[in-house]
């Protein structure tokens, strides 16, 4: 598949993932609602920094594995797809609601909000695991080094996340009306399930279609 096509599909998927309600963007909304836009943006920058740190670790470690054995790459593709299906199952088992109740922790300053975002992502192994599952299915070039491709994918992921999460920060005043309610969002739950399943199927198809 052409490089532009692969990257376009990747960008669309990252946008959908960033828009899906999850711990990170809900936390950004809570910070913005509770402490204002500056703290929301600082939190976003911290989360993005954490993503970039995970990207570097994945690029260095995973690319070495892929270069060592061709079969390792196929195994990672399968394991990544299975992990995405597991995420779909977790969403299926979860309660379809979002609680935007105000946070009780008061940050000491904007830098503390930034630091909280960094720590929240860096110390969350699920971020690295997700990148391990997600990135191999979107390698886009046979001529560019694998580690460089991972870095490019990670930077794109971070930039898209930065843009969308910043929008969430600016729309926090609108979200504030839901701050004291747990909103049932059954349709979003099934969209999340569908996105994870389609991602898993796409990753498998993009790697193994030539065998059929």
Image (cartoon, rainbow, N blue to C red):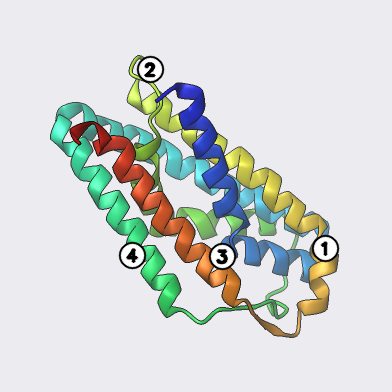
Q: Is residue 178 left or right of residue 56?
A: right
Residue 203 sits above or below residue 84 on the image: above
Where does the image place residue 152, in percent across and percent down from the top left? Answer: 49, 29
Q: Residue at x 69, y 49 (%)?
A: 164
Q: How far apart are marks 4 and 1 (CA)?
A: 35 Å
Mark 3 lies on a secondary structure that is loop
Provide the residue designation for mark 1.
36
- Determine the residue located farthest toward the top in the rendered image: 143
Label 4 crowd (10 A; few <14 / some 14-19 / many >=20): some
Observer-nearest residue: 104 or 163? 163
Q: Which of marks 1 and 3 is nearer the N terminus?
A: 3
- Identify the disc placed on residue 22: 3
Looking at the image, is mark 4 or mark 1 earlier in the sequence?
1
Q: Where is residue 21 in the image (x, y as percent from the top left)?
A: 60, 65
Q: In this view, does 24 lie to the left or right of 73?
A: right
Q: Is mark 2 on a helix, strand or loop?
A: loop
User: What label sits on residue 144 in the rendered view?
Assistant: 2
Query: Closer to the N terminus: mark 2 or mark 1?
Result: 1
Eye-nearest disc, 2 or 4: 4
Query: In the rendered image, which residue does mark 4 sit on?
Result: 86
Kindly check if marks 2 and 1 are in contact, taking CB atoms under 8 A apart as contact: no
> Tag 2 or tag 3, which sits nearer the N-term?
3
């Amino acid at each position: 598949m052409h490089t532009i096509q692969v990257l376009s599909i990747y960008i669309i998927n990252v946008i959908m993932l960033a828009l899906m309600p999850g711990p990170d963007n809900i936390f950004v909304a809570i910070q913005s609602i509770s402490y204002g836009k500056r703290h929301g943006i600082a939190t976003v920058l911290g989360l993005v920094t954490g993503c970039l740190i995970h990207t570097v670790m994945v690029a260095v470690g995973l690319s070495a594995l892929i270069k060592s054995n061709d079969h390792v790459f196929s195994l990672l593709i399968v394991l990544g797809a299975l992990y995405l299906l597991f995420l779909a199952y977790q969403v299926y088992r979860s309660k379809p609601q979002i609680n935007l109740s105000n946070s009780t922790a008061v940050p000491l300053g904007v830098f503390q909000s930034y630091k909280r975002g960094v720590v929240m992502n860096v110390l969350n192994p699920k971020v690295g695991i997700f990148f391990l599952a997600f990135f191999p299915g979107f390698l886009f070039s046979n001529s560019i080094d694998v580690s460089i491709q991972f870095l490019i994918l990670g930077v794109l992921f971070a930039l898209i996340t930065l843009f969308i999460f910043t929008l969430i920060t600016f729309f926090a005043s609108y979200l504030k009306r839901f701050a004291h309610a747990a909103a049932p969002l059954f349709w979003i739950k099934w969209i999340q399930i569908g996105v994870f399943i389609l991602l898993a199927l796409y990753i498998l198809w993009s790697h193994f279609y030539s065998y059929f």
